[in-house]
Structures are given as C-alpha cells and as structure tokens.
Amino acid sequence: MIHHLSEEEVVRRAALQKLREKGIEPFPAAEFKTSTTSAFIKENYKEGEIVVVAGRLMNMRIMGKASFADLHDSSGKIQIYIASDIVCPGEDKSFYNDVVKHLLHYGDFIGVTGTVFTTKMGEISIQVNELTLLAKSLKPLPVVKTDKEGNIHDAFTDPELRYRMRYVDLVVNEKVKETFIARTHIMNAMREYFNSFGYLEVDTPVLQPIPGGASARPFITHHNALDVPMYLRIANELYLKRLIVGGFEGVYEFSRNFRNEGMDRTHNPEFTVMEIYVAYKDYNWMMDFTESMIEHVCLKALGTTQVQYGDKVIDFKRPFKRVSMTESIQEFTGFDITEKSEEEIRTFAKSIGLEVDETMGKGKLIDEIFGGKCEGNYIQPTFITDYPVEMSPLCKRHRTNPDLTERFELMINGKEIANAYSELNDPIDQRERFEEQMRLQEKGDDEAMFIDQDFLRALEYGMPPTSGMGIGIERLVMLLTNNSTIQEVLFFPQMRPEKFQSGPDLKAFEAAGISPEWIQHVVKAGYDSIQKLKEAKPTAVHQTLNGYRKKNKLEIPAIQLSDIESWTL
RNA sequence: GAUCUCGUAGCUCAGCUGGUAGAGCAAUACACUUUUAAUGUAUGGGUCCUGGGUUCGAGUCCCAGCGGGAUCACCA
C-alpha cells in the first residue's frame, strides 16, 4: 500500500519522523479530556473563559509570529488563534516555529487549551495557551473553502470518491453530516411515536430459510452445518405476523432488507423498511395512524411540516388526501376498471401505449396502468386505496368488494413511500392466494411469492384482525432531506468493489535486503520490480540511484556498489 | 441490460482545426502578531484511466476494455 506516495504524503511522513525526534508522539494513547464543544462555546459566549476542545485542524492561516486556524469538532467549528509568545512564553520559540508552522498539517487532530475571546473582525475564537497533537493525518484531505458569501470553492463533488471514501466526504462536506443526523432523528422520532403507544420494537431473522413477505429476487447463501440454502431477507412481514399470532398487540422493526436486483439512484441492494403490525385494527385506522406518525416525525425531526424538495414544497400536515385506485385510474385515463375482464383491461392498457404481455394477470395490468398514468401525479401526500386482489397476496379482501383488497399506499412526489393492509388472517384464503402465486410463477412471473408453510400453520392457530404498514426509510429520508439519490442517505452505498492497484511488491524488496529507507526511492527511480533490478547491471543501478539521490536531495547516505551487489535478487 | 456522456497535478477544472502539459487552491521555502477563500515573492509536483490503431508526431482522431455519471426499463 505504501507505494507511490504523493509529494504531500512524503512531507507528512517526514513531519511524523521529525515530531518523534522532538519527543512529540504523533499518535498518543492518553485520553484527552475536553471541557466543551465549539458549538457550545459560540452559543454560550463568555469572554475570558478557559476551555479545552479537540478536533481537526483545518485551514491554517500563518502570519509570522501568530496564526489562525479553524478547529472542526463534531458540533461544528471554531477559530483558534495561536500566538508565538503565548504558546512559547520563554526564550525557546521552537514549538511555534517548528511544530506549529511546519509540522502540523491540514487535517491533523489536535487538542487545545485556551481562552475564549472575540477578534477584531468579530469572530468568536480561542486564544491557544497549550496545543497537543492528538493524531497526525498522513493523507491530505481535499481542500474545500467557503467565502464570505457562502460560495463553496473547489468542492469535493465526485460521487464515486465521495461514496467510496465517505469518511472524507463527511469531513469536508458539511451538508452530508446534516443529512445523516436528520436520518437518525427521523428514525428516533418514529420509534418515539410507536413506543408512546406501547408497541414493541423487535428483531426477527435476517437469515431465512424461505424469503417471504414480498416479491423480489433474494441473495442466496448456504448454511454449512445444516447443509441447506439460506436467504437474506427480502422482507420481515411474515415473522412480525407470527409475533401477532403469539399475542403481542403491536410490534415493529426497522428491517434491513436485501434484494438481488438492479441498482440506481433509488435502489440499493440493502435498504431499510420500518414495518409495524397492530392487532384489532384495520387499514382505515392505519391511515390515520400513518399520517399522524409522519406529521409527528416532520415536526420532531425538522420542526415543520413544510418541506422543500427540489423545486416543490411538500406539506406533510395531516389529513392526507385519500383516493381509491379505481377513482384514480378513472380520473387520469377516463377508463373505469370496475367489473372489466382481464382481456378488456389488457386491450385498454395497449391502447394507451403501455407495454403489456400475456403473462400479466388482471392485477399486474391494473398496476401498469396506475404506474404509467396516475402515480406520477401525486406530489402532495396521498393515500391510494383498494388495490386489486391479484397484486396483494397477503392482504385481506375488501369488506364490500371481493375483487379488491383493503390496502393503501402512500404516494408522495409521485413515488410510493408506504404500503399497508388490513392483514389477511384467513388461513384458507391465504393458502389459496399462495397457490395463485405459484400459478403466476409457472406462467412466467419471476416475482411471484414463495409459499411459507409454517406461516400458514401460524395463521391456522389464529391471528387477530391486524393492520400492518411498511415504510421505506431511505425514500422518506430522501424526501425530508431534499436528496434525489439513495446514495446520499446511506453512509456506505453499494458500489462495484474497488480495484486497488497491486503496485510493486515492497515486501519482496525488503526480502532482497534493500534497506528500508531506499526502497521507495528505488521504485521511484524506475526499478519497480525485483525483475527489473535483476535485469539491470549493478553498476547502472548504482549510478541511477545515486543520481536520483542527488537530484532529489535525499537526506540519506549514498548507496554503495557493494550494497547493490549484496542484494539477493 | 440499452443509449448518451465523462476520465488531465492532492482537490476543482482549462487545454481550439493533432505540434514539447496549463490555471486556481493545496504542498515546499522566505516575509508577515487579529487573519478568515489571509496576503506577497519564489520553487517543486503529471502513467493526460488502460491497451491497441492511424500519423513524422496523439491529452486531442479511431477501435476495444475498465471505471464513473445521466436517461430509460424492472424491483422499494
């Protein structure tokens, strides 16, 4: 990994060495006790107060015998003022002149003890009395600067680098941290809301023998001891319902689900769905519950229900509009699907230019029409209710129309955010629905569900009437934080594995007996493999290396021909 | 998976009809005790993604590959 250090990395490694020579450990072990944070100092300004803070040293502005810099800690940043006469009160100014001015770098972790004051320019700052290096940064961070108008210069924007090195992204791009803090606040607000009803947060298996509860391609793995295939969960629905069978009134789980499908700006192979199931409720109750919950989350996590998303303002204030799927299709296409046959619907779908084929059942056709012509129109939160029975194999039939189900989806900004049912608890109906899924599978629908016999057995023991709701956490967080890609709301979005250039095998150089101080220079001088050294004449290597040493003014002894001849190549 | 597009210094980016590789910031050195995109002077820094081809000559044109992004299709 050490091959090909950039100039700045060489400088920082040299500084590391010089610090050690001065008796300053660049990676000290001891706890550094801070007394406060940068944000607290600014909010509770007390001139002359002695404070101890720690963070990353950023943006040094050296002005001779005094310097300014920004210290970034987890709460924000504060300016520090380092004056030679204060950090070095005696005759010996070497700490300031050598360490502060030359051996500290952008990105180093430092701790300071100092006095709070305000500069002539009116910025709250810390006059440093004592400075401790806490950890040296050996790689230069991207330098991002913000001017008085708030314009960001030289921003670190390459999505590939940002996602692969989120640690760097978080350090230099302030807004990124805010998004992730908001994500946690949103989830906490949700938890708080559910807990206030006495519902129980639970954990159910991630590794499942049958990937049930949704239609999706699973990730498959293998359990060696049992010698059986196992699947990473695509949903946790069937496990949570088993817990309702077991007698809990309400259970919920933030479920990390895995689906082996395409990746794009709204899909990641692993993603989080919050699912909640409450006994003795139906989907009407769940609609009320969901809109109150979302309103609560907005107020708690954002302080408002009005959210800017792109060029739109979305208002999460309840109540949300409610429209049945039939009404919606009628509104946007003029077509009434009520009591129409599969063929009639297919013909209509074709007539409005949708791509449909013979494998699609009635439910799927209706879904195509809705997805193609209606869905995108719902910008403000809207509940779409009463989906066709074919699309919803785990959902109870509608109390007044057996072709429909008691299901709703919450649409916001033209996308599905939540999905809920009056849960199907009739085990005989449930078995038939699974069998229908099997037929769809045989017809060529590769998304049809697997049958879970144990789940059917649980239902046979009796599940109370129950309503369940699932909400895509990433989708919700994207909306509430004004982000248009899922990668912005996942710390470590999935990416193609990075190829690290193998580079020269430095171990082999060491094994050949080349002195450690020379190895990187040997490589940089052009001998980047043992093979190349073997092929070259020792006298030529000798001349090249010493020529390189002279040219680069290396502070290491010249290499001897006898050294080169002693290498075991 | 399809189409379009991009890959140049540590970072952000220029580089025209092919002719010795550029800027700002960062780094290094010097100056500077209230700066804040600090400033001034000087210096160093490049596998122009990789591999082929065309050409006297390729960062630039052509082909292939790798990687990213955007749009579209499927899934949340």
Image (tube, rainbow, N blue to C red):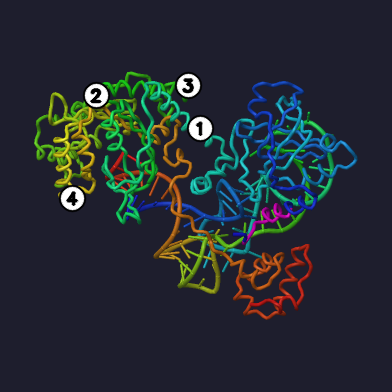
Q: Which residues are magenta?
A: A3-14
CA–CA distance in space, label 2 to label 1: 34 Å
Image quarter in which the C terminus of chain A is found = bottom right
Residue at 76 percent across and 63 percent down: it is A554
Of tags 2 and 1, the one toward the viewer is 2
Name the amino acid, label 1: Ile
Chain letter of disc 3 in the image: A
Of tags 2 and 4, the one toward the viewer is 2
Query: Where on the picture, by quarter, is residue A55?
Result: top right
Residue marked by disc 3: A303
Q: Position of residue A239 (x, y in %)?
A: 30, 37
Is A68 situated left or right of A422 in this image?
A: right
Residue contact at pointers 3 and 2, CB within 8 angstroms: no
What label does residue A282 carry, if any? Answer: 2
CA–CA distance in space, label 1 to label 4: 44 Å
Residue marked by disc 1: A181
Chain letter of disc 4 in the image: A
- Disc 4 crowd rating (10 Å Cα; few below 14, some 14-19, many 20+) is few
